[in-house]
Amino acid sequence: MRNFIWSSLMLVALSLFATVARAEKTYSNADLASDGIRLEEHVKNEGAALAAQPIDQLRKQAMAAVARGDAKNSLYWLAGILSATLEDSASWLAYSRALVKSGKTYEIQKDATTAAYLAYMHAKQKPDEASALARLGEMFALRQEWRPSLTAYRASLDLVNDPFVQAIYQKERETYGFRILQYKVDKDSASPRVCFQFSENLAPGRVDFAPFVSVAGMDTPAISTEDQQLCVEGLKHGEHYAIVLRQGLPSAVGESLLRNADYDIYVRDRSPQVHFTGKNYVLPRVGQEGIPIISVNTQKVGITIIRVGDRNLLPTVRSEDFLAQLSSYRVKHYIESNGKKIWSGTLDVASQLNRDVTTAFPVLEALGKIEAGVYLMTAKPADNGPASNENDEEGGGTAATQWFVVSDLGLTAISGRDGVHVFVRSLTSAKPISGISLRLVARDNEVLAKETTGADGHVRFAPGLARGTGGQAPGLVIAEDGKGA
């Protein structure tokens, strides 16, 4: 009994020792560890028929096959060795090399990478660990997975500073390591900036990047960073800037910028552009000067106004288009299918170089009598001639779009257990309005019921209508006062 207990304790001790030994590994890769379990089982099965043969004989056969470049037989005899002892680091390393010589498929290269990782995990000495990690870096490079390759090479050098591995790592790092990919000048904003895109995330946390950025003529340039991007803010249109990103600029992957990067940046004037102030806009039928349009570096704005047909209100409101910026193709679709173009022309605007200029488009003056309903207005620069947004279909570029509602009625709808309640108030006075005709429309566009508001501006549709499902579920309330509001 004592011998059994002692043996059990020894096994536990050895198990703990193995766990501690593995915990001391400086490099880890969860995906490769998972693949390693699969590959060990596969190799064990492949070499099971040879497991009874003496290890020395298997090694002799494997070395002979490797020497004559016979990859197929190399794998055969190495599998026999590994089936007998899966912790043979040197055999896993040889197995990785033999796999690569046996073919170039993705699966072969993946297994060769996993075999190199197993060689590292089973290695007992630092030189052996370093050799396995260098092989792992080589395998990742073969698969053009540069960041994992650099990480493996770096881990190898941290164990043993091998000049040959160092040269490979340095060359790979210069080409594929942390570096500047490109830059872009954001000239079309009111406050222009230049942003530099890096290959990896910048160093996280409260890092002061100011020492690594120099702008001629600026003592303390404004700098912002996010993920892989660093931006120099507060530039001016029409100005040249000499910008230097200095060697040592830190990243999140333990690498820094290898050398200074010099840039001569010119901030051009803003492109002609037009946009609106917001997504939502309610336009009373009287007393409104217009809808504001913001223009930049243009003296004419092409305008198109479309009214959405009453029968298309429900599908329009439920669509992704509603309140969104539309492509020219979608604008044309609304004109041809869902609504009607009621006005098209140009608006003269003032122009101040690179400044936002706000001009109110006089909707009521342009349209005269305007019906209540849902409208969309599109705008774009038109200095080169009259703009016809709906015909500019090529490329499907986004047009500046303003959705607006023309009405004197403000609606509030609440669905409850006792039915659908609708409250109607004046947008001018906020007082309840009586005598308003309300239609409750289902999702399939069928009119479920009609009611008229009383003195309190309130209507309750029957509870059964609120419980409709599918196409018969309530979808929209339409109000009419008989005066086009």
Image (tube, rainbow, N blue to C red):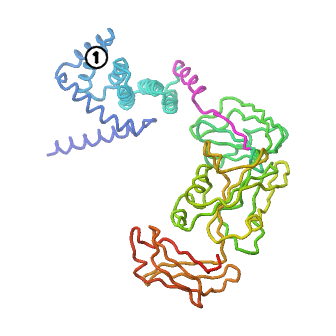
Q: Residue at x 45, y 82 (%)?
A: 419
| In the rendered image, the vertical position of residue 421 relative to residue 1, given as above or below | below
Which image quarter: residue 210? top right
Of the pair 262 and 63, the residue shown nearer to us: 262
Q: Is residue 179 magenta?
A: yes
Q: Is residue 401 left or right of residue 244?
A: left
- Residue 125 pos. (x, y %): 40, 27
| In the rendered image, the vertical position of residue 284 relative to residue 145, given as above or below | below
Q: Residues within 10 Å of mark 1 (few under 14, many from 20)?
A: some
Residue 485 appearing in the image: no
Name, please, the residue furthest toward the bottom: 455
Q: Residue at x 32, y 8 (%)?
A: 68
Q: Is residue 113 left or right of residue 422?
A: left
Provide the residue designation for mark 1: 72
Q: Residue at x 82, y 55 (%)?
A: 349
Residue 211 appearing in the image: yes
How many numbered markers are drawn?
1
Name, please, the residue furthest toward the left: 1
Of the pair 143 and 124, the residue shown nearer to us: 143
Q: Is residue 219 left or right of residue 367?
A: right
Which image quarter: residue 342? bottom right
- Residue 476 pos. (x, y %): 51, 72
Say what secondary structure mark 1 lies in.
Answer: helix
- Residue 206 pos. (x, y %): 65, 49
Q: Is residue 175 magenta?
A: yes
Q: Quadrant of the C terminus?
A: bottom right
Of the pair 211 and 415, the residue shown nearer to us: 415
| In the rendered image, the vertical position of residue 240 relative to residue 80, given as above or below | below
Q: Identify which amino acid the numbered label 1 is placed on.
A: Lys
Which residue range is magenta in the image? 163-186
